[in-house]
Amino acid sequence: MRKIIVCTFLTLDGVMQAPGGPDEDSGSGFKHGGWQKPVADDEVGAAIAGWYERSDAMLLGRKTYEIFASYWPTADPANPFTERMNSMHKYVASRTLTSVEWQNSTLLEGDVADAVRRLKASNGGNINVVGSGDLAQTLMKDGLVDEYRLTIHPVIIGTGKRLFADGAIPTALEPASVSTTKGGTIVGVYRPNGKPTYDSY
């Protein structure tokens, strides 16, 4: 069974929107695009590279797919991520796209939860959900996420789309590994572990 792994960059207050650049996603008037690079370091890059070692595909929502497809095909070939991103298979969940042109891309058909269940049961390595906040929340609500790989950066920006938004399903998480980089970024791997329990002091 293939694992669905949500790989996300977060601010300390949980915002995932537009980490990569000022023009990446200005939806809802977001003015903080490009917040990640100033607070990243070499250890963050190494951790992100490790996210792809046992994964051979990505699962993307429309917005993230379009951002990636406009960048990676012509990205610097000296960047070690360029070949990896272009060669991996991309599964795209969209209600509006009718075709996908980036190499090794497949547009999922029908209900996204059913399509992802079929992907999980197919042959292959793990599948990374990168960015794609709306898609990630759909997968969480349908119990399809097997693991979260998060970088939590030392910056607070106050507004923007959050991975765990209002209405997220209460879930207990088992930490598989947690470390802190020299720049203060928390790199955490967590696995769903049933429902939260409650107690008092």
Image: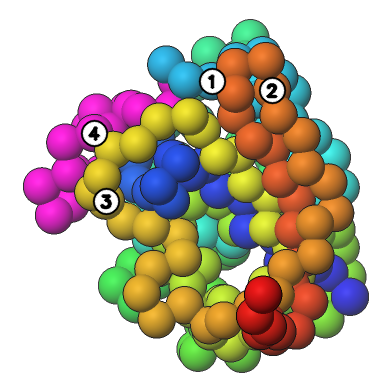
Residue at (83, 46) in percent of width and height = 177
Q: Secondary structure at mark 3?
A: loop
Q: Residues within 10 Å of mark 2 (few under 14, many from 20)?
A: some
Tell me which numbered mark, 4 or 3, is placed earlier along the sequence.
4
Quadrant placement of the C terminus: bottom right
Q: Type of residue at label 3?
A: Gly
Asked whether the beta carbons under mark 4 and mark 3 sit within 8 Å of each other, the answer is yes
Residue for point 40% across, 47% down: 13
Q: Which residues are magenta?
A: 20-37
CB-based contact (under 8 Å), mark 1 and mark 4: no
Residue 10: image location, x then y, percent = 48, 44
Q: Check if residue 189 falls in the magenta segment.
A: no
Mark 1 element type: loop
What residue does disc 2 label? 181
Say which of marks 4 and 2 sits in front.
Answer: 2
Q: Which mark is residue 198?
A: none
Tag 4 and tag 2, C-beta contact below 8 Å: no
List the residue tagged with mark 3: 160
Instruction: Give the secondary structure at mark 4.
Output: loop
Secondary element at image label 2: loop
Q: Which mark is residue 40?
A: 1
Tag 4 residue: 32
Sequence-first disc among 2 and 1: 1
Q: How many marks?
A: 4
Q: Is residue 42 visible?
A: yes
User: Within the magenta stretch, is there residue 34?
Assistant: yes
